[in-house]
Amino acid sequence: MWERLEKREIARRGLRPGPGERPRPDMPAGSDLIPQIKHIVVLMMENHSYDNYLGMLTGRGEGLPLAPDGTPLAVNVLPDGQRFPSHHFPSTAQVDGNPTQSWHASHLSYDAGTCAGFASGVRQTVPGGDPGVPMGYWTEADLPFYYGLARTFPLADRWFCSCLGPTFPNRRFLIAGTADGLIDDLPWDLVDYPKAGTIFDQLTTHDIPWVNYHNVNPAKVLIKRALGTPGLVALRRLARLGRWLPGVLNAERGNKSFTADLYPLGMARCVRHLGTTQRFFANAAAGTLPAVSIVDPDFGAYSEENPQDISHGESFAAAVVNAVLHGPAWESTLLLWIYDEHGGYYDHVPPPDAVPPDDVPAHNWQLDLPAWLRVVLKPLLRKSMANLENADAGPATYDRYGFRVPAVIVSPYARPDFVLSEVLDHTSVLKLIEEKWNLPPLTHRDAAAVSPLAALDLAAPPAFLNPPPLPAPLKPDSYSG
């Protein structure tokens, strides 16, 4: 029943075909072109740049440029001459609200390709914030599991987030190849749907099992969807009224639930494709993970977004990776450890040009209001509107990638001692799924994307068939899932 209902929901959307052909136009969509890999697991954590986490990983990948004495050379300078060099953080704790990865701050950090605007971005978008915070980094002593993972399996040192912006737009690229105009993390803006749909639509249409594992109470999810997608959209539109309340406006973040929810989900999808984190570990232990899994951390405790202690997120990620490594389906699994965006932390590699996904412009909701209404509202909500306008200021295009993020490809077929330096982004995950099941692209972005398959050697016996030992995380008991 639920399967029929879900397919009916998809059909009612009247989705349009995306650009481009299937990888093998001579074969039907849904054909399995990579039979060695039966399970793809995407573990997307939160808010750290490559240099911030792996910049001090020596002898592997492109980290921070170093002086002869081994200290990083990177520095940001404010217009008044204040200098903020790269520095090692004294602990695994983070500063609340600093740095920021808003649309405006991210574009300021890019600074015309110099990557010299991270300190200025904080100065302009975080009132009273220390401009030196984004220049901090951690080392192997702070993140032993992550460094061990990056030393063992193929490291992608050119994996960029999909746009110069925050969580929601980047996670939308992961599942749809487009942000569909979104540039912020305001939940009441999540009422639209991309013209070609999401990768979940394609998977369901071709009977390819998928699950988004998350940490939200299932009963709460189902109650919110009791009226179906129209009811959910109505609730989110009603929540738009909250944008006029200063207290709600200031709570721009902290509203994440799970990745699949970044486009409206109906009841059937919630029943069929949402699972708890506990269910993920049970399925991994039993060898019954679906064809595609997205694993979301508890966004309030284990995601690694500030002000969380990053060692807690490392312990969660270690638990997920080890569950896959030591599960009975390891021999046919590919796991991607990636981050949604840079979190406002420094990276020295300027993001390159990117193919615009579609013709939907990035937009600021305030600028969409009629001019007369903006004039009326500005005196009433001057501070709140100014804060949002500041966060969302910037260009109206998605023609550039965001900053580099940590990325490792984990599989028994992984190439030993390998660094993948092709330009990748979150739509590379879509490309991987499309190449695996002969699916057409959703947008121009994933049509042009490169998959991470070069990190695997599928023609040889798997080099990591016996799971290699990995270091324990700094605080192995801090994840209590």
Image (spheres, rainbow, N blue to C red):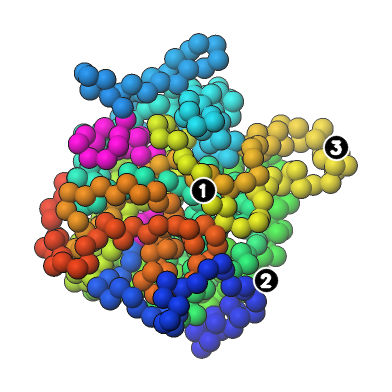
Query: Is the residue marked by circle 3 packed among few (<14), some (14-19), or many (20+) residues within 10 Å?
Result: few
Q: Any magenta on residue 44?
A: yes
**Residue 74 image label:** none
The residue identified by callout 1 is: 354
Q: Main secondary structure of the magenta part?
A: loop
Q: Classify residue 165 by image quadrant.
A: top right
Find the residue positioned furthest to the front: 26
Q: What residue type is labelled 2?
A: Pro
Q: How far apart are marks 2 and 3 (CA)?
A: 32 Å
Q: How far apart are marks 1 and 2 (CA)?
A: 34 Å
Between tags 1 and 2, which lies in front? 1
Q: Which residue is drawn at 56% across and 35% down?
A: 107
Q: In this view, does 175 lie to the left or right of 159?
A: right
Where is residue 368 shown, x and y percent of the image?
Answer: 76, 48
Q: Residue at x 70, y 33 (%)?
A: 386
The residue identified by callout 3 is: 375
Query: Which of the two residues, 22 or 222, is positioned nearer the viewer here?
Result: 22
Where is residue 429 shown, x and y percent of the image?
Answer: 40, 60
Q: Give the range drawn in magenta.
A: 42-64
Q: Earlier in the sequence, mark 1 or mark 2?
A: 2
**Residue 230 image label:** 2
Label 1: which secondary element = loop
Q: What residue type is labelled 1?
A: Ala
